């Protein structure tokens, strides 16, 4: 798991990626792992689509169009959950397993969203790491900066897939 910067090196200087400054290019191996973790979410979304179409039954094109018209993952999860409530017998082991899979997916979705939507940076004090910074943070707030190294990104990728 990523560690807060204040635990790894509380005195580290931070370079936040900005126009013209590209920390991912300074760490191409880590950038590739981050991109793989982000891209692997497409596998999860594809699985969810196929599952929805299967549970929806009948017209595959209609089910696909409905699912893909939903604008965010929360709405898609709600649609899948509603379909599952009709598809699986209430109280069945299958429904329980399905709900557990959705919970795991939700957890991984949050991690993926950070990789995709937070701000990347780095530090000369941590040459083998990238920093991921909550965009709502202030520059001096190290509580919101996380340290990602190769092991953390590989672990994130393995959970995504």
Image (spheres, grey):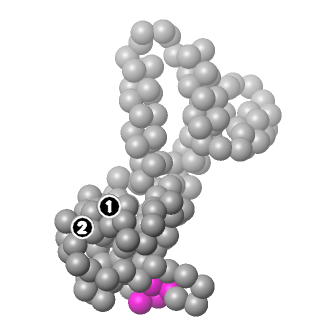
Q: Which mark is residue 143?
A: 1
- For the residues marked 2 and 1, what is the alpha-carbon distance in whole angstroms? 6 Å
Residue 57 image position (x, y, % from top left): 69, 25
Residue 56 image position (x, y, % from top left): 67, 26
SS type, badge 1: helix
- Lower position in the chain sequence, tag 2 or tag 1: 2
Check residue 24 for magenta coloring: yes
Residue drawn at (59%, 48%), measured in percent from left and top? 46
Q: Which mark is residue 41?
A: none
Mark 1 packing: few (<14 Cα in 10 Å), some, or many (20+)?
A: some
Q: Main secondary structure of the magenta part?
A: helix
Question: In the rendered image, which residue does mark 2 sit on?
Answer: 6
Q: Do labels 2 and 1 touch, CB within 8 Å?
A: yes
159 w.r.t. 115: above or below: above
| Magenta-drawn segment | 22-26
Q: Quick check: 60 left or right of 122?
A: right
């Amino acid at each position: 798991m990523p560690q807060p910067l204040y635990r790894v090196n509380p005195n580290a200087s931070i370079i936040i990626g900005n126009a013209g400054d590209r920390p991912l290019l300074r760490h191409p191996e880590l950038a590739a792992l981050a991109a793989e973790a982000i891209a692997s979410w497409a596998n999860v979304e594809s699985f969810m689509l196929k599952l929805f179409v299967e549970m929806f039954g009948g017209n595959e094109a209609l089910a696909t169009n409905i699912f893909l018209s939903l604008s965010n993952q929360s709405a898609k999860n709600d649609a899948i959950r509603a379909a599952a409530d009709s598809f699986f017998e209430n109280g069945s082991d299958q429904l329980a397993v399905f709900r557990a899979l959705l919970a795991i997916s939700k957890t991984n979705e949050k991690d993926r969203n950070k990789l995709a939507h937070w701000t990347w940076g780095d530090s000369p004090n941590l040459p083998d790491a990238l920093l991921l910074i909550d965009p709502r943070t202030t520059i001096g707030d190290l509580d919101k900066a996380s340290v990602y190294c190769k092991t953390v990104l590989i672990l994130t990728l393995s959970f995504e897939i």
